[in-house]
C-alpha cells in the first residue's frame, strides 16, 4: 500500500502571511534546557501538519526521516506518510512530558520539540511561544 502523498501544501485552514508565527526554536545562543523548539499546530492531524513542521525545522535538520510523537496529542495518523517526496516514519511513544516530539534527521540531528495542543487559548499559546524564543540568560537579566 502506498502512503498518502503530502507533496502539495496541505492546509488545515486557510493560512495567510499575517498568521502569527507558530514555531519557535530555542535561540542558538542558549544551550540550556531539554526542549529545542516549541510548536503550536493548527490541528490535531499530524499528517496534515507535517509539511509546515518539516519546512520550519529544515534550517536545523535538513531531511527528517523519523518522528517520535506523543499519541495523546494527535489523532490517529498514517505511520509512513510521504512529505515533499520523502517517506517519514511516525512512531508513537507516551512521553512523560505531554506533547513532546523527537524529530530525527538523516544527518544524526535530533530536535526535541514541545507541541502546544492545537485547542489552547491563543493568548496562552502565544505567550508560550514568546517564552520559547527567549534565552535563559535574558530571562535572568529581567528579574
Image: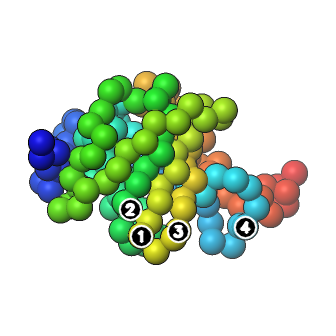
In whole angstroms, how far apart are the C-alphas of marks 4 and 1? 22 Å
Crowd around label 2: few <14 · some 14–19 · many ≥20 (10 Å):
many
Task: Write down the residue under mark 4.
Answer: 31
Which residue is at 37% across, 60% downward? 65
Which residue is at 35% across, 50% downward? 89
Q: Is residue 136 left or right of residue 108?
A: right
Query: Is residue 85 among what the camera can see?
Result: yes
Mark 4 lies on a secondary structure that is loop
Q: Which of the marked residues, 4 or 3, is nearer the chain's N terminus? A: 4
Which residue is at 54% across, 62% downward? 110
Q: Are marks 2 and 3 in contact (CB under 8 Å)?
A: no
Q: Which of the marked residues, 4 or 1, is nearer the chain's N terminus? A: 4
Q: Which mark is residue 109?
A: 3
Numbered disc in front, either 4 or 1:
1
Q: Could you tell me residue 116's position as x and y percent?
A: 51, 36
Q: Which mark is residue 64?
A: 2
Identify the colour scheme used.
Answer: rainbow
Q: Are marks 2 and 1 in contact (CB under 8 Å)?
A: yes
Task: Write down the residue under mark 1.
Answer: 106
User: The N terminus appears in which quarter of the rendering?
Assistant: top left
Q: Which of the marked residues, 2 or 4, is nearer the chain's N terminus? A: 4
Which residue is at 52% across, 36% downward? 93
Q: Which mark is residue 20?
A: none
Amino acid at each position: 500500500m502506498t502512503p498518502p502523498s503530502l507533496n502539495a501544501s496541505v492546509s488545515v485552514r486557510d493560512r495567510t502571511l499575517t498568521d502569527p508565527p507558530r514555531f519557535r526554536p530555542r535561540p542558538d545562543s542558549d544551550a540550556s534546557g531539554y526542549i529545542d523548539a516549541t510548536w503550536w499546530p493548527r490541528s490535531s492531524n499530524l499528517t496534515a501538519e507535517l509539511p509546515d513542521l518539516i519546512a520550519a525545522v529544515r534550517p536545523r535538520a535538513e531531511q527528517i526521516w523519523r518522528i517520535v510523537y506523543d499519541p495523546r496529542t494527535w489523532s490517529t495518523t498514517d505511520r509512513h506518510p510521504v512529505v515533499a517526496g520523502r517517506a517519514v516514519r511516525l512512531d508513537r511513544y507516551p512521553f512523560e512530558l505531554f506533547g513532546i516530539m523527537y524529530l530525527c534527521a538523516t544527518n544524526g540531528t535530533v530536535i526535541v520539540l514541545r507541541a502546544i495542543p492545537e485547542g489552547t487559548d491563543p493568548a496562552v499559546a502565544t505567550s508560550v511561544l514568546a517564552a520559547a524564543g527567549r534565552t535563559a540568560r535574558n530571562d535572568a537579566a529581567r528579574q
